[in-house]
Image: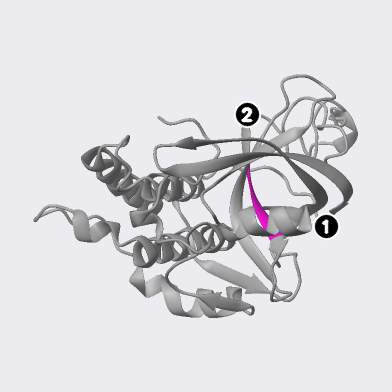
């Protein structure tokens, strides 16, 4: 049996499993665009959950930033409260719920969050892409908590779920050809069937229902479906108020512009 003392912990590996020091005042290394779930307090005193891409700073000491698209609940709550709670979860069901549904809760931390960061936000730029306004925000950590540390694993099904939310959110956006996006979604569904577990299949079923992308496929195309995975897992994962349909005060992703901080493909 291997002796753990023969393999000392590499101090250059942060809690996210990535080489390099953690971003100052953050519990992880924010690199490239790191996906998260942000909780913001609404006028109804409930916490709205939404997916939010965190942009790594260009230089050490620069702030982490994020971009909101459209007049969303997150944009409104950032404007009015100037604060939020960033969460890091590897639960695909929680992530898809935040990305394509309205999910509100009495508390800001999801059950599956491994860590979270309380932030103050400040708008530092704005503009428009097509007909959609965007705002850039600087995120300043106030306090953070690490609930659990995990041994990093790589699952292609999980990655396919995350990328599928991006592709689905770009349907009906002129800059992204619909046929290319549908091809990607079919591929992602096939990857989830081959490589994903129960949670990935459940998350993809939610994506199917909320975006309706399968209705756009040409006759004869029948990618894997995951309806049978929905009921029990979703009942367990949605103790808070969950609302189907429109999220963030705008149409569902099949009728909305790009909602992510990533660059276009």
Asked which secondary structure carries label 2, the reply is loop
In the drawing, what numbered circle is on residue 32? 2
Q: CA distance from mark 2 to mark 1?
A: 24 Å
Q: Give the SS element for disc 1.
A: loop
Query: Relative to the observer, which residue lies in front, 167 or 229?
Result: 167
The residue nearer to you, when weighing 74 against 237, is: 74
Residue 186 pos. (x, y %): 28, 48
Density class for disc 2 (Cα within 10 Å; few <14, some 14-19, many ≥20) is: few
Taking the image as shown, residue 168 lies to the left or right of residue 239, namely left
Q: Is residue 233 left or right of residue 168?
A: right
Q: Quadrant of the C terminus?
A: top left
Circle nearer the viewer, 2 or 1: 2
Q: Which residues are magenta?
A: 35-39
Please tell me whether residue 228 is drawn above or below residue 166 in the rendered image: below
Counting from the top left corner in percent of width and height, residue 128 is at: 49, 37
* Circle 2/circle 1 CB separation < 8 Å: no
Q: Residues within 10 Å of mark 1 (few under 14, many from 20)?
A: few
Q: Position of residue 23 (x, y in %)?
A: 81, 32
Quadrant into which the N terminus falls = top right
* Figure disc tally: 2
Going 75% across and 26% down the picture, which residue do you hit? Answer: 19
Q: Residue at x 82, y 32 (%)?
A: 22
Q: Which residue is mark 1?
A: 147
């Amino acid at each position: 049996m291997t002796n753990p003392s023969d393999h000392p912990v590499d101090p250059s590996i942060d809690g996210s499993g990535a080489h390099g020091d953690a971003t100052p005042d953050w519990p992880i290394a924010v690199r490239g665009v790191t996906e998260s779930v942000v909780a913001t307090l609404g006028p109804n005193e409930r916490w709205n959950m939404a997916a939010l891409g965190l942009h790594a700073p260009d230089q050490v000491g620069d702030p982490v930033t994020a971009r909101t698209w459209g007049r969303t609940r997150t944009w409104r709550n950032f404007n009015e409260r100037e604060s939020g709670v960033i969460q890091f979860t590897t639960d695909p069901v929680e992530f898809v719920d935040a990305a394509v549904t309205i999910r509100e809760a009495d508390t800001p931390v999801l059950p599956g969050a491994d860590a979270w960061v309380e932030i103050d936000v400040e708008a530092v730029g704005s503009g428009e892409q097509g007909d959609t306004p965007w705002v850039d925000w600087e995120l300043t950590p106030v306090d953070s908590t690490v609930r659990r540390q995990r041994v990093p694993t790589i699952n292609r099904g999980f990655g396919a779920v995350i990328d599928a939310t991006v592709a689905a959110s770009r349907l009906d956006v002129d800059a992204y050809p619909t046929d290319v996006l549908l091809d990607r979604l079919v591929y992602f569904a096939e990857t989830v069937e081959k490589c994903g577990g129960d949670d990935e299949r459940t998350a993809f079923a939610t994506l199917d229902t909320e975006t309706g992308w399968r209705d756009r496929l040409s006759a004869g195309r029948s990618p894997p479906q995951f309806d049978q995975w929905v009921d029990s897992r979703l009942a367990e994962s949605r103790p808070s108020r969950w609302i189907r349909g429109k999220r963030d005060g705008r149409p569902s992703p099949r009728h909305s512009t790009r909602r992510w901080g990533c660059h276009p493909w």
